[in-house]
Image (cartoon, grey):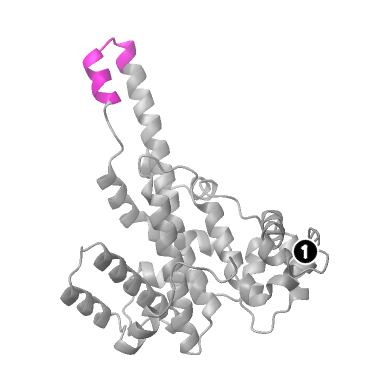
Amino acid sequence: ELMQRLSSIEVISSSLFDLGPNFPALIDALSAKAVTLNQLDPLISNVEWLKEDVLRLVNQPRYRNKTSSGNLVKDIKTALRFLGIEALQALVPVYAFRHCIPHSTDPFAQFKVKIWDYSLATALAAREIANTQGLNGFVAFCAAMFQTMGHMVVIRNYLRSYAQVKRTELLRARDARDNELTDALESLDADAGFLSSSIEEFAGIISADLIARWQLKRMPLAAILDQIVDETPLSSCTDLTRVVKQANTYVQVKFLVQEQRLDVEEANKALNEAGVHNEMRKMLSALDLKKLSFE
């Protein structure tokens, strides 16, 4: 059942919040060095959910205090002036990602928290590494953020498949008046091990396929995610792919050390192999990988 779902791009696409047909053009525009607020105004206005999110944000006290009257901001052009391009370059991918996080992942309630913490941390780390190397920090941020979209597709479809199969088998057992089988089925929980292996097998490919469907003209997001899925060696991949891989390794090591699942020797080995040298580690350790500047 799960394999059938994950082999259909239509099912995969419908598993996530619909960002709309105009979202890719906006992301592309944000990656341009010379983009202006006037250029972004109509693009953001064409993405209804984002327009609502932006207006909601600027009408919070932090931003409303900037207006002389303190009145509600209803015009998107005014809202964009409050935020500025730098804030929008973080806000747009972050809000898109948040909308795609499933509302419920029970019985794996921690999934939502962990996928958000990891995705934000890698995005912030990738942006910092890219900026210090003269690369496009926005592209690195988006690639790191959106690389886990496939994780959300897999868990949502696994939970749907599990619930559907369990419901079908329970009905059969009850129709057959098989109380023992009914009790056994009712006591069954979703299999965390199977979910983990499914994520490992399918999530990366799904993320790359989803982003490829955006058909971005400026941003090489699909190419970056393809190289990550293909495990292209650092010596052969593009600079931006290397940056995202380094961010991934740094954050994974940081989280595993915090959970005492990796010792110092193993951590240093992993970081060295990814080219995360001491100077880069020092720079990243000074970053707050949990906080966004616009919130």
In the rendered image, residue 94, in percent from the top left (x then y), is placed at 55, 63
Q: Hey, which residue is sitting farthest right in the picture?
A: 69
Q: Which residues are magenta?
A: 173-186
Residue in view at x 30 percent, y 16 percent: 173
**Dividing the image into 4 quarters, which one contains the N terminus?**
top left
**Dividing the image into 4 quarters, which one contains the C terminus?**
bottom right
Q: Hey, which residue is sitting farthest top in the picture?
A: 177
Q: Is residue 230 visible?
A: yes
Name the magenta segment's main secondary structure. Answer: helix
Residue 182 inside the magenta-drawn segment: yes
**Helix, strand or loop at mark 1:** helix
In the rendered image, residue 284, in percent from the top left (x then y), is placed at 39, 80
Residue in view at x 75 percent, y 73 percent: 81
In the rendered image, residue 230, in percent from the top left (x then y), is placed at 35, 69
Q: What is the count of numbered marks?
A: 1
In the rendered image, residue 99, in percent from the top left (x then y), is placed at 56, 53
Q: Which residue is mark 1?
A: 76
Residue in view at x 52 percent, y 70 percent: 142
Give left or right: position of 200 versus 46. Answer: left
Residue in view at x 25 percent, y 20 percent: 183
Tell me the kind of residue under disc 1. Answer: Ile
Foreground residue among 256 and 173: 256
Dot 1, crowdedness within 10 Å: few (<14), some or many (≥20)? some
Q: Is residue 181 above or below residue 100?
A: above
Residue 295 inside the magenta-drawn segment: no
Foreground residue among 117 and 271: 117
Foreground residue among 4 and 178: 178
The image quadrant that residue 244 belongs to is bottom left
Q: Is residue 215 visible?
A: no
